[in-house]
Image (cartoon, coloured by chain):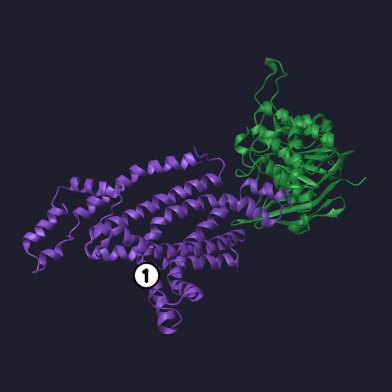
Chain colours: A purple, B green
Amino acid sequence: MSQYVLRRLLIAIPSLLGISLVLFVVLAMAPGDPFAELATNPNVPPEVAAALRAKFGLDDPIHLRYLHWLSAMAHGDWGFSFVSRMDVDQLILQRLPATLYVIGSAQILALLIAIPVGVYAATKPYSLFDQIANTLAFVGFSLPTFFTGILFILIFSVTLDWLPLVYTTDVKGTGIRWVLEMIRQAIMPVAVLGLFQAASMTRFVRSAMLDVIRLDYVTTARAKGLGQAKVIVKHVMRNAMIPVVTLIALQMPAVFGGAIVTEQIFRIPGIGSLLISSILANDTPVVMAVTFVFACLVVLFNLIADVLYGWLDPRISLR
Amino acid sequence: MAPLLEIKGLKTHFSTDDGILQAVDGVDISINKGETLCVVGESGCGKTVTAMSILKLIAMPPGRIAAGQIIFEGRDLVPLTSNELDEIRAKEIGFIFQEPMTSLNPVLTVGEQIAESLRRHEAVTRKQALERTIEMLKLVQIPNAEGRVHNYPHQFSGGMRQRVMIAMALACKPKLIIADEPTTALDVTIQAQILDLLQDMKERFGMAVMLITHAMGVVAETAQRVVVMYAGKVVEEAPVDELFGDPRHPYTQGLIRSIPRIDLDAEHKTRLEAIGGSVPILINPPVGCRFAPRCRYAMSICTEKEPRLREVSPGHRMACHLGDTSLGGAA
């Protein structure tokens, strides 16, 4: 098992290298220049700007720049943000907790809704509960988060004034008050992201359950007199969760993508909003690093999915 | 002596988009204690649905027991809820299914799947259940039972999985075993082994067996009494010797003629006889005898009046107008 994980991590190295190369080339070809500000600033003499460009190797051929970046990364040097005037790794570490907190809570909320609703709907297909759940799920994933997000803000912040409009990292107060305030300000982004995720997941859980529920071994389990609850949980759910795990892992890139939008709407200072502001400010080292972090997270979640697979399905041996 | 299980006038219907499918339409079957009863018929004749109706293992909806009684040890099972039936499932009536490849849960060990039945119905600890499970696996002749109990179904061959299924069905020592085509999915050599094992277990535990099959060879080998079903109805019922020696219903005769024979000389060999046509669709079935369109003896009355199941000799009943004296000299 640990050997399997180790090998998968080693296999991840070439794919991450490939990803980083593509990202680097695309960013190098993209319009915009981190030193554009220097070029237009009349206080900076042109020769100083040129010297700086030479110092940072901005005019080197692209393969040399990539190798520079790679060796710096290998040494733990993630680069320097020209806009924020601080090291990129510091910047990301500052922003990552907010993103993980919101995305993590949203995923947990989505699972807490999707699994019970999907499972119960599948045990009573075409019942009233199932019809309502299906309709709501359809509405849920038809509405984009940037729409529901603004709607939530309008209702709960502007009209009712129950929840704060802007998410902040320096919450005032200590102890329990701090915790409560952290929860209060996360309610809207977590609900928007979580409900959107829950909608598609519910439909997937339901159909995975329906696929398993009519299989022969479920009839075998019923013939043992185990009772509905035990048959569903022990025999149906356990098998139905196998494809659901894949879906969740495959959805992770979309979740991060969705988080970028949600962070913009709720002004959450996470890495998603860092990415957007860096792109707008031509802060290339930050853009590069953040997209690379996203890539690493996606690879990591795929690995977690594969390990879960082996645990859920004994027919898959992780060797 | 009252029979162990008595099915009276059972009608199981399925609602489909095209109408009500009358899969089982007025079936009477009874099984005595310790008896082996074979239910034979073509695919789609309602054998499996009849068996599944006993413990309400059919999907409801769309399935529905429309009429009839299923009396097990003096108690009618039809009005019972699924929860009430859970006390009878596996404990009183065990089930062996057709497909050993798909009838075991792939993500649980075989030991767990046998033990859960024991733990459900008997006050045993986890350890006792494991011991009993190993004992059952030994009984169905699975080598190295102590090691194999922790294996998953995919680590067993088809024949071995069917042995596991038998062990599972027998675990709580039920009074009746319903085996739905237990050998159909297996190699011929394995088939014989499984039938022998079933016979063996039956004698050891003194239970009754309801064996559902479409193979007449299996019937001849195992049954004491045979029920022949056609298109959702019982057409003939007789002790096994009498059924093979003196089949009365044209459908039974056809079934017996369609058994391949290797005991005839080459010059006597003829093409294997098949029954022409196919089973009627059971949505709005035709009036009269359902076999009439395929019957070589069909008379005008056959498409007008449904033949009743009547006794032709003690213990031998059949549903055909042929030779029915009450009709006034027909045939």
- Asked if one can make out residue A126 in the rendered structure from this viewpoint, the answer is yes
Question: Is A107 or A315 nearer to us in this picture?
Answer: A107
Q: Residue at x 43, y 83 (%)?
A: A161
| Residue B18, percent from left and from top | 60, 56
Horizontal side of residue A216 vs A109, given as left or right: right
State which chain disc 1 sits on.
A
Give the percent coordinates (x, y) of residue B104. 64, 42
Question: Please, which residue is most extreme toward the right here?
Answer: B1
Q: Position of residue B62 (x, y in %)?
A: 65, 57
Q: Residue at x 70, y 48 (%)?
A: B49
| Residue B43 against residue A137 in the figure, above or below | above
x and y percentages locating residue A215 in the rendered image: 61, 48
Q: Is residue A48 left or right of residue A110?
A: left
Position of A194 relative to B231 (above/below): below
Q: Label 1 neighbourhood size at 10 Å, few (<14), some (14-19), many (20+)?
A: many
Residue B256 visible in rendering: no
The residue at which mark 1 appears reads as: A268
Which of B9/B279 is in front?
Answer: B9
Q: Label 1 is placed on what type of residue?
A: Ile
Q: Residue at 40% of width from left, 77% of height from top?
A: A153
**What is the quadrant of residue B292 in the picture?**
top right
How many numbered marks are there?
A: 1
State left or right for residue A208 relative to residue B288.
left
Identify the image quadrant of residue B274: top right
Foreground pick, A307 / B261 = A307
Q: Nearer the viewer, residue B98 or A303?
A: A303
B11 versus A183 height, above or below: above
Is A228 above or below relative to B300? below
Residue drawn at point x = 68 percent, y = 44 percent: B112
Secondary structure state at the residue bearing disc 1: loop
